[in-house]
Image (tube, coloured by chain):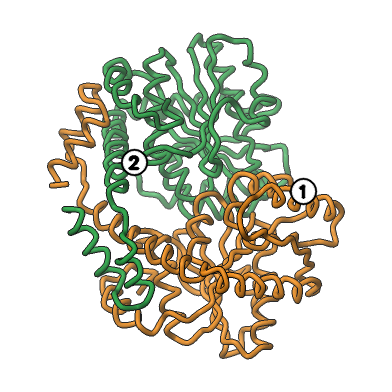
Chain colours: A orange, B green
Amino acid sequence: MVENGDSAVRSVMKDLAPMATGARIIGLTGAPGAGKSTVTSALVREFRARGERTAVLAVDPTSPFSGGALLGDRVRMQDHATDPGVFIRSMGSRGQLGGLAAATPQAVRVLDAAGFGVILIETVGVGQAEVEIASAADTTAVLVVPGMGDAIQAAKAGVLEVADVLVVNKADRPETQRAVRDLRSMVALSSAPWKPPVVTTVATSGEGVAELLRQLDRHWAWLAEAGERDRRRLERARDEVTALAFGAVRARLAVPDELAARVAEGRLGPHEAAEELLASAGF
Amino acid sequence: MVENGDSAVRSVMKDLAPMATGARIIGLTGAPGAGKSTVTSALVREFRARGERTAVLAVDPTSPFSGGALLGDRVRMQDHATDPGVFIRSMGSRGQLGGLAAATPQAVRVLDAAGFGVILIETVGVGQAEVEIASAADTTAVLVVPGMGDAIQAAKAGVLEVADVLVVNKADRPETQRAVRDLRSMVALSSAPWKPPVVTTVATSGEGVAELLRQLDRHWAWLAEAGERDRRRLERARDEVTALAFGAVRARLAVPDELAARVAEGRLGPHEAAEELLASAGF
């Protein structure tokens, strides 16, 4: 229902709200090929070893499709296929009022209310989307791969702003130490109260995964100490409400042909047209 | 000013509107590595040979940065660096009221008013962004590369909907014929009045570029015959006005702490909160 933007979601969300305030939400993002699914799968194993019921939400902002798991995910996640304490779902962006920014917290609310203590949100880092989705998490891990200049560029361009933990995956490749050094020097420039640690992993073999988990736990503890846990949940609620309000407004802002024609023919400036539209819609 | 979302853009757009209704706008999109810049550069050469003043707007929805050309673009576009009839600019998404969906048509309006007869909008295909940006063009060419399953998947997942011309670039690679066949069979399933032709190019050597231009011209002529040229311009104006109105509304929809807290603590459903917010903002 969340994926389809079903109108009954409204009352379901209202009913689930009081039951859904406990889960720990961890975001994983990175460029295609960074190994997100493999790292996610390795983390699921660790959390299961602790007895935590664990859910994975694979959010693909580039896909309109929802439902089930993508083929690649299925292969990488098959270790967990028969474990009833693990739930894995892929989600696209079609049909959702407010888009993924609204659908993600709704899906999280359902999983939280269903008793999953840990929810991993995996999303491809392709620009604005991962920033929006990272805002849905308590802790966000950003994955990069050694020698992928693009990943570092992406990190510089904004992904770094959302990272609580930086992971250099595929750390058996050459240039790992250089990637670690580059990331550490970027982190050193930050004046934020939390300095993202840089962890190296080879997720396919499990190497470094225990250390990654330790850093995720350290951040989780810090969030509580610093009062950040509540602050992030407040921001999350704010973003969700904004996205829903926004979606409702959009539905009411249809541009009449006559107005569009005046802009298309150069008889009216676009900003003046926007103002006319808002006025006529009663805003 | 457009890139920075300067408030004076409003009056500039109004003044330029009557002067900006003539340019032919061509969109080029495709996955990273499809050779967009090389194909763009080859098309610039063709249009210059016809004496057309030609502008290139490289829109990167994944980058917050604007200004100048990206390094890679600069290298690929250097053939045109000293030609005063060519203008090349990269544009990111930071600071723009209404985001790229508003900034792109504004930049196009400036270039059109400045007398560029052809405006090429090059954008990386990473999901929703290229759909929005394709809607800014009269004709959209979608580039794929042989053997890149991802590109075909992307095409299936929605990019195909926006393609007026399909280009298999790097057609000296194996699997070119298979990619062409796959695309042709997808096109054959469409019941739309315009069937996108499939063109093969090796843009680095110029092979196939004349045929690509011929197909772009054929689509441009078809747009006029079918009455589609005006219809697309109307849709474009509509999208621009919507994005601006939307941006203005967003600025007025700040969620108060108290409201966000009730949602975060599960005391209020998110939809009810959105409704309260809209009501309190007078919507």
The residue under the point 43% across, 79% down is: A21
Assess disc 1: are there few (<14), some (14-19) or many (≥20) residues with their C-alpha within 10 Å of its C-alpha: few
Can I make out residue B139 in this image?
A: yes
Task: Give the image location of residue A133, x and y in percent.
Answer: 50, 61
Identify the element where label 2 is drawn.
loop
Residue A3, percent from left and from top: 39, 69
Secondary element under disc 1, as helix, strand or loop, is helix
Q: Position of residue A25 (x, y in %)?
A: 53, 73
Q: Residue B193 carries which label?
A: 2
Q: Looking at the picture, tell me which residue is in the foreground, A6 or A166.
A: A166
Q: How many labels does the image show?
A: 2
Which percent across, then down, holds residue B85?
53, 10
> From where the camera sits, is residue B137 visible?
no
Amino acid of disc 2: Pro
* Side of B17 relative to A183 (left or right): left
Q: In which quadrant of the rendered view does residue A53 lie?
A: bottom right
- Residue type marked 1: Asp
Chain ID for label 1? A
The residue singled out by tag 1 in the image is: A182
Q: Is residue A8 left or right of residue B155?
A: left
Q: Is residue A259 above or below residue B77?
A: below
Q: Is residue A120 left or right of residue B230?
A: right
Q: Residue at x 35, y 74 (%)?
A: A1
Q: Distance between the residues labelled 1 and 2?
A: 53 Å
- Above or below residue B47? Residue A276 is below
Q: Is residue B213 above or below residue A237?
A: above
